[in-house]
Image (spheres, rainbow, N blue to C red):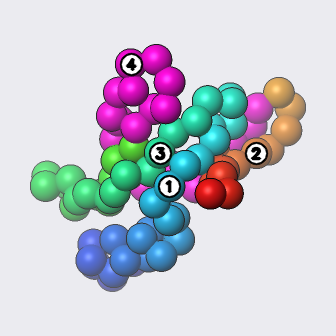
Amino acid sequence: MENFIEELNYYKNEYCKGKYRHFKGKEYELLDFAINSETLEIMVIYKQLYGEFATWVRPAKMWGEKVEYEGKIVERFTKLKN
């Protein structure tokens, strides 16, 4: 991407706020996006919907990537229908 604003807009269009299921089965809510002030990397802000309901941050490029799990290639997070 040419600049971080363009990249931010890409992720905002690609991943809607709402509930997602992690490939290991737990549910999370994508709350918003942020920009790392030191690196300008786009981050996803999300909350676990179980246990302590902690809020987490993860690089946006990791949010939509595919991972290998139990011998299969799967999405890291899958959007849940409302």
Closer to the chain start, of discs 1 and 3, is 1
Please identify the quarter of the rendering in which residue 70 is found: top right
Q: Which residue is mark 4?
A: 52
Q: CA distance from mark 3 to mark 4?
A: 14 Å
Query: Can you identify the residue that label 1 sits on?
Result: 18
Q: Is residue 45 left or right of residue 70?
A: left
Q: Which label's residue is closer to the chain start, 3 or 2?
A: 3
Determine which quarter of the picture holds residue 40: bottom left
Q: Residue at x 68, y 42 (%)?
A: 67
Dot in front, 4 or 2: 4
- Quadrant for the C terminus, please: bottom right
Measure how far apart labels 1 and 3 are at the Cα level: 5 Å
**In the image, which residues are magenta?**
47-69
**Badge 3 amino acid:** Glu
Which residue is denoted by mark 2 in the rendering?
Answer: 74
Callout 2: SS: strand
Q: CA distance from mark 1 to mark 2?
A: 20 Å
> Tag 2 or tag 1, which sits nearer the N-term?
1
Report the residue marked by disc 3.
29
Seen from this angle, which residue lies furthest right?
A: 71
Q: Earlier in the sequence, mark 3 or mark 4?
A: 3
The local crowd at label 2, few if under 14, some if 14 to 19, many if 20 or more residues have their Cα within 10 Å, is some
Kindly state the secondary structure of the residue where label 4 is placed: loop
Q: Residue 35: in sight, yes or no?
A: yes
Name the residue furthest left: 37
Contact flag, marks 1 and 3 (Cβ < 8 Å): yes
Tell which of 3 and 45 is nearer to you.
45
